[in-house]
Image (spheres, rainbow, N blue to C red):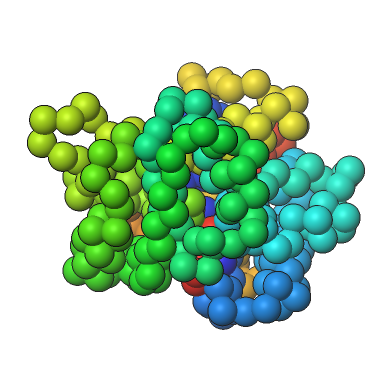
Amino acid sequence: MDVGIGLLAAASAVRRLRPDADLVLSSDPDGMPWGPRTPRDITARALAVAEAAAARRPCALVIACNTATVHALPALRARFEPDLPVIGTVPAIKPAAAGGGPLAVWATPATTGSRYQRSLIRRFARGVAVAEVPCPGLSDAVEQGDEDAIDLAIAAAALRTPAGVRSVVLGCTHYELVAERIRTALQRPGLPPLVLHGSAHAVAAQTLRRIGHPPAPRSPADGSLTVVLSGREALLPDPAFTYAEGRFLLREPARARARRGPARPAAGAAGRESSG
């Protein structure tokens, strides 16, 4: 679940580890954007999106959204656990700091400098130089699939990123959809390749651990896909096909199943300042 298509990164990571997983992608286009909302509003919207996913009887609920994790994780766990495991998304500051600095954390303006992000930096990046870089407009541009706006937002954030940064934490799930464009904008001639740290793979692995289904990347690619937009079954919105993750999820067999109806509950997983 996410406010928008930022969930594609985690969903495709689950699909790669378990091609047989039935995925429910639940988002909230009617409630966009979540970033300017109060924490209480965000929690209410996140609960509604989660209820729409839970109605399809998944084995796990993935909060593929940093904003929803920050504000709504306790409420979601109180509502659904222990019957339905809830997995949140945390910026990958810990593994990035383990590799040394300097590093940068790209995040939405509302998350940059927040108590939540600062606490992660204090806990996991002691002694490491960390630059917090706000990326206004980037998640919105990614959500809309607006190529020009994406390039402008990335270029502006790159100018705010200190020279010499060795790694970048992608602190919004939407940013993972344009990771290579971010790498290209930040890579400096003559320097080692920049390391980007997203959350999707770790979230997917944790999801499978929580439900007791080990990775099986060679299992039959027969997992179904159900898309729920503000409580209504639908197809993925057109901007999703701008990204490799969206095209990967909606290979033709999955498209046919998505049109027919909800996913079965076996071995499934329900897939972050406007968006992630």
Q: Position of residue 196 (x, y in %)?
A: 36, 38
Q: Quadrant of the N terminus?
A: bottom right
Q: Position of residue 137 (x, y in %)?
A: 36, 71
Left or right for 168, reference 154 = right
Residue appearing at x 50%, y 61% in the figure: 112
Q: Is residue 88 visible?
A: yes
Q: Position of residue 148 (x, y in %)?
A: 19, 69
Decide which of 205, 17 is in the foreground and name it: 205
Decide which of 38, 240 is in the foreground and name it: 38
Residue appearing at x 44%, y 44% in the figure: 130
Decide which of 201, 219 is in the foreground and name it: 201
Decide which of 201, 136 is in the foreground and name it: 136
Left or right for 137, reference 268 = left
Residue appearing at x 56%, y 66% in the figure: 3
Q: Is residue 20 visible?
A: no
Left or right for 251, reference 242 = right
Q: Position of residue 80 (x, y in %)?
A: 84, 53
Q: Residue furthest front?
A: 127
Q: How many marks?
A: 0
Residue appearing at x 88%, y 44% in the figure: 83
